[in-house]
Image (spheres, helix red, strand yellow):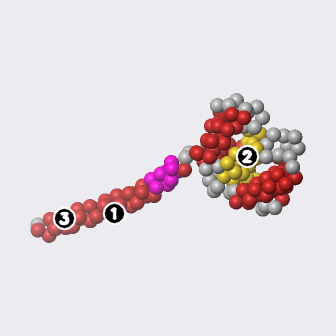
């Protein structure tokens, strides 16, 4: 059944707004996924990454992209395509899609992504998905910062101890 023109315009305008505000967009091929599996993926993306998973006709997606500052994605809008729309964190939705695909015969497949208005390849999205969680990265940075401070404190402590030892030796020599 053909979609009515006013419905197409509504979907296009809504999608254009979401694409304009999204910092991260991944195009996926969802071939082979059941409606139930797509629903599960939507739920995981929403709950774990604060992202949205939308299946939209390619022609409507192309029209919606026309009014945005996103790069040209026309060559990737072939065949079944769904969009992952997310905020500023490109890692969380990539991880969710990757983990979901591991349990579903490697589906969906990421075709291409857009992060910070720049096209990223399927391989780059995979590398993003393999990064440690944000909390681990922040802990590692904090650990290296405190390790540096600890090293300075240790060096200063050693210097003070050496000075105290020298003063003590000079005092002993003065007594003799």
Q: Secondary structure at mark 2?
A: strand
Residue 33 image offset from top left, x and y in percent: 73, 33
Residue 90 rendering spot, x and y as whole percentages: 64, 51
Q: Position of residue 89 (x, y in %)?
A: 62, 53
Which residue lies at the image location 69% right of the left edge and 56% below the top edge? 22
Q: Is residue 94 magenta?
A: no
Q: CA distance from mark 3 to mark 1?
A: 18 Å
Residue at the spot of label 2? 54
Query: In the picture, which quadrant includes the C terminus?
Result: bottom left
Identify residue for label 1.
156
* Residue in the foreground of this view, choosing between 139 and 26: 26
- Label 3 belongs to which residue? 168
| Residue at 62% in and 46% down | 46
Q: What residue is shown at x 87% (from left), y 40% (from top)?
A: 1
Of the residues tagged 3 and 1, which is closer to the observer? 1
Q: Residue 129 versus residue 172: which sits nearer the camera?
A: 129
Please give the range of residues in magenta.
135-143
3 relative to 158 in the view: left or right:
right
């Amino acid at each position: 059944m053909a979609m009515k023109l006013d419905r197409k315009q509504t979907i296009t305008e809504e999608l254009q707004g979401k694409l304009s505000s999204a910092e991260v967009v991944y195009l996926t091929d969802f071939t082979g996924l059941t409606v139930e599996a797509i629903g599960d993926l939507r739920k995981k993306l929403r709950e774990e990454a604060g992202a949205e998973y939308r299946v939209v006709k390619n022609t409507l997606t192309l029209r919606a992209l026309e009014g945005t500052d996103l790069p040209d994605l026309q060559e990737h809008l072939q065949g079944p395509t769904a969009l992952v729309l997310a905020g500023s964190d490109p890692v969380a939705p990539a991880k969710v899609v990757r983990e979901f695909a591991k349990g579903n015969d490697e589906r969906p497949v990421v075709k291409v992504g857009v992060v910070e208005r720049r096209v990223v390849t399927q391989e780059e999205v995979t590398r993003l998905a393999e990064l440690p969680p944000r909390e681990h990265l922040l802990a590692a940075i904090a650990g290296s910062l405190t390790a540096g401070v600890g090293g300075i404190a240790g060096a200063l402590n050693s210097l003070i101890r050496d000075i105290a030892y020298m003063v003590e030796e000079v005092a002993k020599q003065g007594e003799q």
